[in-house]
């Protein structure tokens, strides 16, 4: 029996990456006097690495050869990333990033049906609470029994750790839950934790292989714009 829905955040609840996280990274870089500029295309490649701090490190290692990194690289990245979080929250507070179609309706319907709700994400906890408060409801955080986010587990997605953590906190078995994801890294993580997973595609993830998902849709849909099933079956 299905008892809980577990949601990814970035790309699943809202299209936060291109106009949110990416812009916030660029603002933090500019503020730090760095001439790094993550284009929409480049950011698509950088999304391969989950976690903002991990993504900055990957960029330095892979795309930024002329950069002479400071000796204490980790704290340097952490403070650059803290500035990015400040810019990101500011963008959310401006209200420019709405929830994706069908997200609010599904969450409200699940809540009134007595379904338990949880979050399993790579992003920083305060990013999640700001998004839920600004885009879902002022008390949106309280709608979720478990908000598993960021650095609380040692290994970020695609490792299954964050989903395993959420399952443990919910005290449920994977077969009692359904995960919602948008990315190959997220799907690997949820499947690794034994969860059936629904994929909602977005601009950055639509060309990836999601053949292991239970259901792939283009969005969660509204009455005036129903979702399209791309593979899988809703009855499975
Ligand atoms: C989301 C991420 C995050 C965000 C940035 O992945 O990869 O890194 O882009 O968040 P998922 P932070 O949707 O699979 O959880 O900068 O706060 O880490
Ligand atoms: Mg995601």
Image (tube, rainbow, N blue to C red):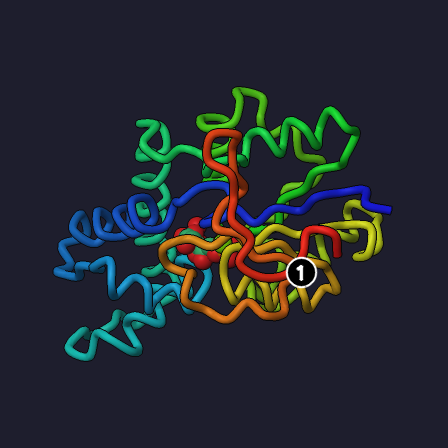
Relative placement, left or right, of 187 versus 175 is left
Reply above or below: 106 against 218: above
Q: Quadrant of residue 96?
A: top left
Q: Nearer the viewer, residue 145 or 33?
A: 145
- Residue sitting at the far top: 138
Relative placement, left or right, of 192 versus 104 is right
Q: Nearer the viewer, residue 151 or 47?
A: 47
Relative placement, left or right, of 137 versus 147 is left
Identified at 67% across, 47% down, the residue is 6
In the image, the residue with mark 1 has its CB under 8 Å from the nearest atom of ligand 2: no
Query: Is residue 124 visible to the viewer in this orientation of the structure?
Result: no
Measured from the top left, where is residue 66 in percent x and y? 15, 77
Measured from the top left, where is residue 8 in percent x and y? 56, 49
Mark 1 sits on what residue?
214
Measured from the top left, where is residue 71 in percent x and y? 30, 72
Instruction: Give the position of the C terminus as an image quadrant.
Output: bottom right
Q: Nearer the viewer, residue 128 or 226?
A: 226
């Amino acid at each position: 029996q299905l008892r809980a829905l577990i949601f990814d955040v970035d790309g699943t609840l809202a299209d936060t990456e291109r106009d949110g996280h990416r812009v916030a990274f660029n603002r933090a870089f500019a503020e730090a006097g760095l001439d790094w500029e993550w284009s929409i295309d480049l950011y698509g490649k950088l999304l391969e690495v989950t976690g903002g701090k991990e993504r900055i490190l990957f960029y330095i290692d892979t795309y930024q050869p002329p950069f002479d990194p400071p000796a204490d690289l980790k704290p340097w990245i952490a403070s650059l990333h803290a500035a990015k979080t400040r810019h990101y929250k500011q963008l959310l507070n401006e209200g420019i990033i709405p929830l994706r179609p069908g997200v609010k309706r599904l969450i409200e319907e699940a809540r009134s049906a007595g379904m338990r709700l949880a979050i399993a994400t790579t992003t920083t906890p305060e990013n999640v609470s700001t998004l839920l408060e600004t885009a879902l409801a002022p008390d949106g955080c309280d709608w979720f029994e478990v908000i598993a986010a960021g650095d609380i587990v040692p290994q970020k997605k695609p490792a299954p750790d964050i989903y395993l953590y959420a399952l443990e906190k919910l005290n449920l078995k994977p077969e009692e839950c359904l995960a919602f994801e948008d990315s190959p890294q997220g799907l690997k993580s949820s499947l690794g934790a034994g969860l059936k997973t629904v994929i909602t595609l977005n601009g950055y993830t639509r060309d990836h292989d999601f053949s292991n998902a239970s259901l792939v849709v283009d969005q969660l849909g509204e009455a005036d714009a129903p979702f399209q099933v791309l593979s899988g079956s809703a009855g499975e």
